[in-house]
Each structure stands twice: as structure tokens, then as C-alpha cells.
Image: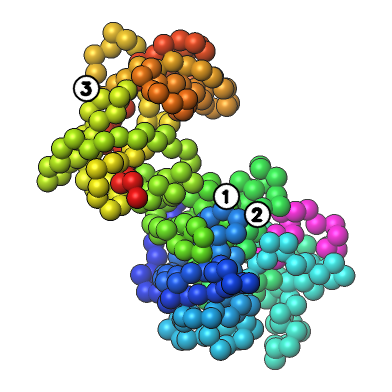
Amino acid sequence: MIKKNSINNEKIVDLISIVKSFDHVKAVNNVSLGINEGEFFSLLGPSGCGKTTLLRIIAGFEKPENGNVFINGTNVNSVAPNNRPTNMVFQNYAIFPHLNVSENVGYGLRNTNLSKDKILKKIDEALKLVGLKGYNKRASSALSGGQRQRVALARALILKPRVLLLDEPLSALDKNLREQMQFELRQLQKSVGITFILVTHDQTEALTMSDRVGIMFNGKVDQVATPEQIYNKPETKMVAAFIGSMNFFETKCLEKSSKTVTVFHKDLGNVKLLKNNIFGVENTKLTIGIRPENLKIISDNLKIKSKSFTAKIVEKSFMGDTMLYSIKLNQSENNNTYNISVSDIKNSLNPNIGDEISVAFEEDDVVAYYEE
């Protein structure tokens, strides 16, 4: 896990009731969102959810039909992209193929009053910042994917924006290089100290790098929180299903107290839920969610204080660092399967397909959603 920054709680970007439609479809639907100065903020969601449109509205490449965009306290609705204190790194990097590295990085300084020597100095500083010192004369066609990304970052940062906007900049890289660049991008943000706003559909990318994450579906932001809060306490069933893997069980409410709600499931039995782990508008039906890593395979003769149930293994997959089991419940009337993820393979039980197993879980790890 990459260590996060300490950030300023003053908003550098403030979006108020933003609406944007294309062909009568609302790509962004009444979004209000504040992003803090010095923060690494990610907009995460499936394709078509509106995250890139929202980023382009901040940049000034799209105009909202309704709502206001404030950057550093100034309404920038009528301010052109080149006059905003932002810069953008595009998904395809937009590297000019006929220019070398130095010419690409210094492109935005061409029409400034800076002397040639000062421009060359700034280019050298920007290349050093992104780990490309000495690459000035390298042809664009001779760059690897990771090097092209670094050139795009240097070109964006050389203008010293208050906010750097990144539109899925790692999506074209292979897995190993993408993971390396996640670390480098986060370290770069910490070193320059400015606000980064990243658009991505990659959950690992968003959770690993961000101070906070905004989850978008259908033009709306469902939840804004830290990566830990997003993963451990997703506030909607859609967020819970989208982030990582979640086992859902339909239950019925039995009784309520000031701090807990007790529900019943045929296989899991009575489960006592903490009220601050329950989300939605209160009614009699609750869907509970348990992460696969929070289900533990245990010995039948082991005495435990946790809740437990029995199940049958129907599939078993070796994932390298984890073993993934698919199980079916014994009393369930449907054909649903549920997942158990075991990370400590060497020190864990190793049942096979067809085996009956006992499964334990902690009630504090359970989240729940009232059915709409």
C-alpha cells in the first residue's frame, strides 16, 4: 500500500450541481463535489458512467448545461481551457510524433516571454522530475509506453498547474509496468504537492493511489470516501458489488435495538448487524454482504465464538497468492454460488471439490442494505 499524503482541507475544485447531456442522455446528472488542495482524488466507475465527461468539464473542454465550476475560489464556467490553472494528461498521451522529447515537453512554453536558456532549464527540471534526465534529444518514436507517459506528465507539469487532470493514463500499459507507474505517479504527486484528479475504471489503481475516491454510476456520484472506507463500508449495494468481490445474502429482519438489527437467513441463521453498517431506507428486508476474505474455512471440531454455517465446495481455483473457493449453501433453494478467498494457503485447510465444509465469519465484518 502506498502511503497517502497529508492534505489541505481547503477546496481547490468545487463542482456545484453540474449537469451535462448528450443526445438527451444525462452523462453528468446534478453532481456536486469538492476536491481538496494537494489531494490525489480518483473518479472511479464503469465505462459510460460520466467520469471522463466530468473531468473534461473541469478542464473546460466541455461546458455544463447547468451548475458551476469553481477552481481556487473562482467561477471558471466562461474561462477557456488554456486560461484555467489546470493541465491534462490524455489517455493516448498526445505525444507529437515529429518532435523529440525536449520539444514535446517544452511545447507549452513556446509563446511565453521566457528566454531560450530558461526554457531549456525548465525542460531539464521537468525531465529530471519524471525520471527522464538526459532524454532531451530522444525521438518520440523511440520511447516505450512508460517513457511516453512520463513525457506527457513532464509536459503537463512544466506549466505548473494548480490541478493536474489525468484521463486513464495507465490503461495502455501492461500489468507490471502499470503497477510500477502507479507507484511513480503517486510519488510524483507527493513531490510536486499539487492536486491530481485521476479518471480510471481500474479499482486497484484508484484504491492504491488515492487519498479519496468518488464512485460514479449513470452520471451520479454514489459515494466519496477514503479507499479504506469505500472497500470496508460501501454505502450502496452498487458500490459494494463494483468494488472488489462481495457475497450477497437476502435476509429478513427479526428484531431491532438501539445499536443493532438482527436478521435471519436459512443457512447463516440469526445475524446481528451493527446499525452503522446498514445503509438505505429502512424496511423489513435486508441484503447482507460479506467479502470473500472474511469467510474462513474451519475444522468441524473447532470451538469458535464467530458465526458459522455449512456449505459444499463446487469449484476451486489457484490464483497464485490466493486460493479461491466457490461454494453452495446446503439449505438454499437457489443455485447461487458464493466465494471464499484464502490468502495464507500454506497454513490453511485445503479441502477439495465436493467436500462439505464449515465456514465462519465475524458479524462486525458484515455490511447490509435495505431493499428498495
Tag 3 residue: 305
Q: Which tag, 1 or 3, sits closer to the chain's start?
A: 1
User: Residue 360 colored magenta?
Assistant: no
The magenta segment is: 139-154
In the rendered image, the vertical position of residue 317 relative to residue 247, given as above or below: above
Identify which residue is drawn at 61% across, 46% down. 179
Classified by dominant secondary structure, the portion drawn in magenta counts as helix
- Place of residue 230 in the rendered image (x, y in percent of width and height, measured from the top left): 40, 50
Q: Of callouts 2 and 1, which one flags the residue occurring earlier in the amino acid sequence? A: 2
Dot 1 falls on a residue whose secondary structure is loop
Who's the residue at 66% across and 53% down the image? Answer: 171
Q: Nearer the viewer, mark 2 or mark 1?
A: 1
Distance of label 2 from label 3 (alpha carbons): 45 Å
Residue type, numbered disc 1: Asp
10 Å crowding of disc 3: few (<14), some (14-19), many (20+): few
Q: On the rendered structure, is 300 left or right of 188? A: left
Q: Can residue 152 be found in the magenta stretch?
A: yes
Question: Label 1: how many residues lie within 10 Å, few (<14), some (14-19) or many (20+)?
Answer: some
Residue 165 horizontal/vertical position (percent): 58, 68
Is the residue 265 above or below the residue 5 in the image?
above
Q: Are marks 2 and 1 in contact (CB under 8 Å)?
A: yes
Q: Tell me, yes or no, whether the two marked residues, 1 and 3, touch with CB atoms within 8 Å.
A: no
Q: Amino acid at mark 2?
A: Leu
The residue nearer to you, when weighing 274 against 197, is 274
Mark 2 near mark 3, Cβ–Cβ under 8 Å?
Answer: no
Q: Is residue 89 above or below residue 113?
A: above
Q: Quadrant of residue 140?
A: bottom right
Q: Is residue 284 left or right of residue 39?
A: left
The residue where tag 2 is placed is 170
Q: Which residue is mark 1?
A: 202
